[in-house]
């Protein structure tokens, strides 16, 4: 991952992680850090589709009432619609590999580079980026297309401290950059995608 020369964009896939209504059903949604999230993810989805490169969506389920598969909130957010051929993979782990067949799908598609987007920045997105790097993938962590919330420190049912989102953003970038991923921009990836020769219909 420290190699400055990335895998070609033609071998890239876009991962949209846990952009699901489950988060909107919780009070913390009002304290989200990135109000450009929907626009940035949408631009990347459009860019990957225009380049005819894979887009894969993920939904996370756990014991939380809003994240259970039976919850009406367990669905992609309204700004996203998976097209035919774009899978929605259901995961129960923080990373996207362990509880899905993601790696087999990527190998079948010849993918060696991944663009990571979604919710939460320092949890499922960062963990996916770390695992992907360890598996040998070249990773673009599109931090401006991720989203998170302040992290409370709870002791005996009471919040005694809180990590603000600015600290989470800084720590995530420092932990990943040059070790597990590039911190990529939406504009930068879209410029690469636009330079890729178009495939025949």
Image: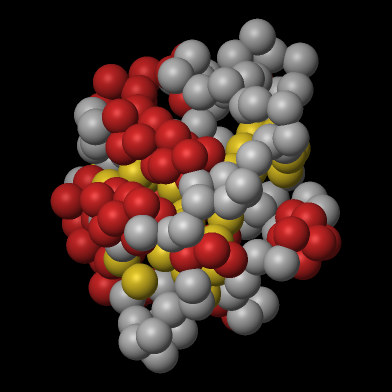
From this viewpoint, which residue is outermost toward the top? 72
Left or right of 88 in this view: 196: left
On screen, residue 39 above or below 97: above
Which residue is depicted at the point 77% across and 66% down?
107
Left or right of 147 in this view: 67: right
Residue 98 visible in the shown view: no
Which residue is depicted at the point 40% across and 54% down?
193
Which residue is depicted at the point 79% across and 51% down?
100
Which residue is depicted at the point 60% across and 14% down?
73
Where does the image place residue 149, in percent across and percent down from the top left? 32, 38
From this viewpoint, which residue is outermost toward the left? 166
Quadrant, the N terminus: bottom left
Left or right of 188 in this view: 176: right
Q: Nearer the viewer, residue 98 or 197?
A: 197
Where does the image place residue 38, in percent across and percent down from the top left? 35, 28
Quadrant, the C terminus: top right
Left or right of 45 in this view: 99: right
Quarter of the image for residue 135 reads bottom right
Quarter of the image for residue 109 reads bottom right
Where does the image place residue 157, in percent across and percent down from the top left? 44, 35
């Amino acid at each position: 991952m420290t190699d400055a020369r990335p895998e070609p964009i033609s071998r890239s896939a876009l991962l949209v992680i846990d952009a699901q209504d489950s988060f909107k059903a919780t009070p913390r949604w009002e304290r989200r850090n990135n109000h450009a999230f929907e626009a940035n993810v949408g631009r990347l989805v459009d860019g990957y589709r225009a380049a005819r490169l894979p887009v894969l969506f993920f939904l996370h389920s756990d014991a939380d009432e809003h994240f259970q598969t039976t919850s009406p909130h367990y669905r992609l957010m309204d700004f996203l619609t998976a097209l035919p051929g774009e899978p929605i993979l259901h995961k129960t782990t923080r990373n996207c590999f362990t509880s899905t067949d993601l790696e087999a799908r990527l190998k079948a598609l010849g993918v060696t580079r991944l663009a990571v987007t979604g919710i939460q920045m320092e949890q499922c997105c960062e963990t996916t980026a770390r695992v992907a790097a360890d598996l040998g993938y070249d990773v673009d962590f599109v931090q401006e297309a991720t989203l998170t919330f302040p992290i409370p420190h709870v002791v005996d049912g009471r919040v005694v401290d809180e990590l603000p989102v600015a600290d989470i953003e800084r720590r995530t970038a420092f932990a990943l950059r040059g070790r597990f991923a590039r911190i990529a921009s939406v504009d930068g990836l879209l410029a690469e995608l636009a330079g890729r020769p178009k495939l025949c219909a």
